[in-house]
Image (cartoon, rainbow, N blue to C red):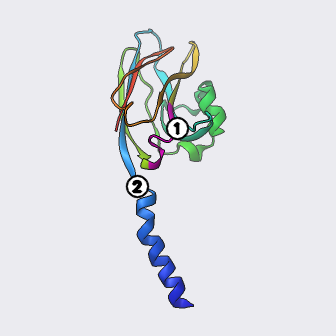
Amino acid sequence: MKTIIAGTCLAGALALPGLVHARPVVLTTQLQNYGGNGAYLAFYLTDAAGKYQKTLWVAGSKVKYYKHMSDWARGSGLNPREFDGLSGASVGSGKTLKITVDVADTLIDAGYEIRVDSAVEDGRDNPADARAALTKQGGGKPVKGRGYIKSFTYDL
């Protein structure tokens, strides 16, 4: 019995790295020249049905403003475990944010989408300001935003 358990554990340990292999993905977001305070941005993944799956990054450090990124806030439940260690400063008008995140290989070309919600204090909130299908072919192709985001690009 011990031999079977040991063998099963060894097989699982050898197979697991192949199942959870992730690759670095560079997210580049150029903001419009809108004037005003820095923008809060939430980068997250949705599945083929548009349902929230995972937070990739949050730009903006004051948690009290996170609720204004409504689609992300609703999907993540604003649960700190969803964004702990995945945040940085807000992004100024006309500036570019470039970050690198890890994305599991199994999510690429599998119907997932990267979405970016944006919000600015005393300004409009923009759920899904930018959205891009997570595909090998979509890498490097800029997507136009609908609000504060001028363009969004990801590179695999």
Against 84, is 40 above or below? above
Residue positioned 54% across, 90% down in the render? 2
Nearer to me, 123 or 75: 75
- At label 2, counting other C-alpha atoms closer than 10 Å, the crowd grade (few under 14, some 14-19, many 20 or more) is few
- Residue segment shown in magenta: 106-114
- At label 1, counting other C-alpha atoms closer than 10 Å, the crowd grade (few under 14, some 14-19, many 20 or more) is some
- Quarter of the image where one finds residue 62: top right
Instruction: For marks 2 and 1, give the one nearer the viewer.
Output: 1
Q: Distance between the residues labelled 2 and 1?
A: 18 Å
Residue positioned 63% across, 43% down in the render? 79
Please provide percent x and percent y for residue 75: 64, 36
Residue positioned 47% across, 11% down in the render? 36
Nearer to me, 136 or 2: 136
Against 50, is 94 above or below? above
Is residue 122 highlighted in magenta? no
Against 76, is 66 above or below? above
User: Would residue 50 appear left or right of 107 to someone viewing this image?
Assistant: right
At numbered mark 1, what does the secondary structure look like: helix, strand or loop? loop
Q: Which mark is residue 21?
A: 2
Against 34, is 12 above or below? below
Residue under label 1? 111
Placement of the N terminus among the 4 image quadrants:
bottom right
Q: What residue type is labelled 2?
A: His
Asked if one can make out residue 106 in the rendered structure from this viewpoint, the answer is yes
The first of marks 2 and 1 along the sequence is 2
At numbered mark 2, what does the secondary structure look like: helix, strand or loop? loop
User: Would residue 105 appear left or right of 75 to someone viewing this image?
Assistant: left
Please provide percent x and percent y for residue 93: 41, 15
Please provide percent x and percent y for residue 90: 45, 26
Is residue 107 highlighted in magenta? yes
- Quarter of the image where one finds residue 54: top right
